[in-house]
């Protein structure tokens, strides 16, 4: 599944060579893709995997599986739950996330992804928690 999604993404990327980057991104999921599958595709094609693993192992960034239902401390010392809102905010404004042991190197995706794409990624990330806390 993952392989074929990647192949499809590469195909789409290859076809979109002449288009400016902003419009090269389709406004909606490829045919037959639901929100979660689209989110997975976006996760794989927008560099997230360069810094995040989804098997509980730390990389440049923290692993993103099994995190929904836990909580985080913000820079100002506020405790917030890891839920859909938190996931969305950590994509738009990662500088607000403060995780001990990690460098603040994650780019903000507000300029790079459409809101509907952010939503799809959040949908996908939510499915990575199989044992809600
Ligand atoms: C250059 C490396 C890098 C890339 C690329 C990157 N991240 Fe991150 N991400 C990080 C780091 C480092 C942190 C921890 C930030 C901190 O402590 O301030 C983080 C934090 C997060 C968090 C909060 C995790 C938690 O446990 O609280 C989420 C969610 C997240 N990233 C999702 C994504 C997604 C989705 C993408 C792709 C669209 C992405 N990241 C791309 C490095 C990266």
Image (cartoon, rainbow, N blue to C red):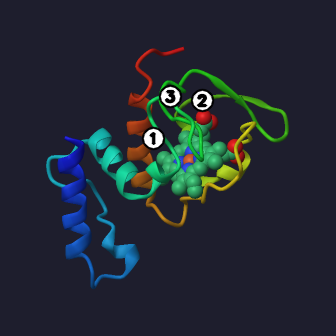
Q: Quick one: quadrant of the C terminus?
A: top right
Provide residue 52's location: percent of width, then percent of height. 51, 44
Of helix, strand and loop, which one carries label 3?
Answer: loop
Q: Residue at x 56, y 21 (%)?
A: 69
Q: Nearer the viewer, mark 1 or mark 3?
A: 3
Q: Residue furthest left?
A: 32
Residue drawn at x 38%, y 45% is 120
Q: Earlier in the sequence, mark 1 or mark 3?
A: 3
Quadrant where the N terminus lies? top left
Around disc 1, counting alpha carbons within 10 Å, would you say few (fewer than 14), some (14 to 19), or many (20 or more)?
A: many
Q: Can residue 88 be seen from the camera position used here? A: no
Question: Which residue corresponds to mark 2?
Answer: 82
Image quadrant assignment for residue 122: top left
Q: Which residue is mark 3?
A: 56
Circle on res. 93: none
Instruction: Give residue 50's position: percent from left, percent from top.
Output: 48, 53
| Residue designated by label 1 | 122
- Specify whether residue 18 is in view: yes
Separation of disc 1 and disc 3 at Cα? 18 Å
Which secondary structure lies at badge 2? Answer: loop
Q: Is residue 57 left or right of residue 29?
A: right
Quarter of the rendering containing residue 126: top left
What is the secondary structure assignment of the residue under circle 1?
A: helix
Q: Going 38% across and 38% down the picture, which residue do you hit?
A: 124
Q: Name the one closer to the observer, 86 or 61.
A: 61
């Amino acid at each position: 599944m993952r392989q074929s999604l990647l192949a499809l993404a590469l195909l789409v990327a290859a076809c979109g060579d002449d288009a400016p980057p902003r419009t090269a991104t389709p406004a909606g999921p490829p045919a037959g893709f639901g929100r979660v599958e689209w989110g997975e595709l976006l996760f794989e094609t927008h560099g997230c995997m360069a810094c995040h693993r989804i098997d509980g192992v730390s990389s440049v960034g923290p692993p993103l599986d099994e995190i929904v239902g836990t909580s985080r401390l913000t820079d100002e010392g506020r405790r917030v739950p890891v839920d859909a809102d938190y996931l969305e905010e950590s994509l738009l404004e990662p500088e607000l996330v403060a995780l001990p042991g990690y460098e603040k190197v994650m780019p903000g995706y507000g300029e790079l992804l459409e809101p509907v794409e952010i939503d799809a990624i959040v949908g996908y990330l939510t499915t990575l928690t199989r044992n809600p806390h």
